Amino acid sequence: MEQTKTMAPADTEVKEGLTVGPKEGLGAGIIGLGFLALIMPWASGQIATLDFIKSDAFAILTGAIYVIGILVMISGIVVILQKPESET
């Protein structure tokens, strides 16, 4: 008789060492915030040059800072309330 090997589908395999946890997610979020902070002055200057915008770049940049500040505070609250992996 011929023996056949049964292999598990690729989506069910678990590769050790390739997991993404809260630490990696937090790091990616911080990198994203840094990227936003770097492009905000340029973006607000470009938005201010549009004909239908009646505001200057400073006001647009101030509003963007408020939005990012709120997102950072919400992210901090989520990180504080998150349970460690050992408790789950």
Image (cartoon, rainbow, N blue to C red):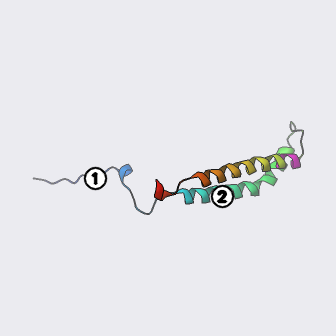
Classify mark 2: helix, strand or loop: helix
Q: Is the magenta region chiefly helix, strand or loop? A: helix
Left or right of residue 4: residue 41: right
The amino acid sitting under disc 1 is Met
* Image spot of residue 42 (x, y percent): 80, 53
Q: Residue furthest bottom?
A: 17
Left or right of residue 11: residue 37: right
* Image spot of residue 25 (x, y percent): 57, 56
At horizontal 45% and vertical 60% (from top left) the residue drawn is: 18
Quadrant of the rendered structure where residue 80 is?
bottom right
Q: Residue furthest left?
A: 1
Classify mark 1: helix, strand or loop: loop
* Image spot of residue 48 (x, y percent): 86, 45
- Looking at this view, is 8 or 33 the one in front? 33
- Looking at this view, is 77 or 8 the one in front? 77
- For the record, the magenta segment spans 57-61
Q: Which mark is residue 30?
A: 2
At horizontal 13% and vertical 53% (from top left) the residue drawn is: 2
Which residue is disc 1 drawn over? Answer: 7
Left or right of residue 57: residue 71: left
Is 14 included in the stretch rendered in magenta?
no
- The Cα–Cα distance between marks 2 and 1, rounded to whole angstroms, is 40 Å
Q: Residue furthest top?
A: 52
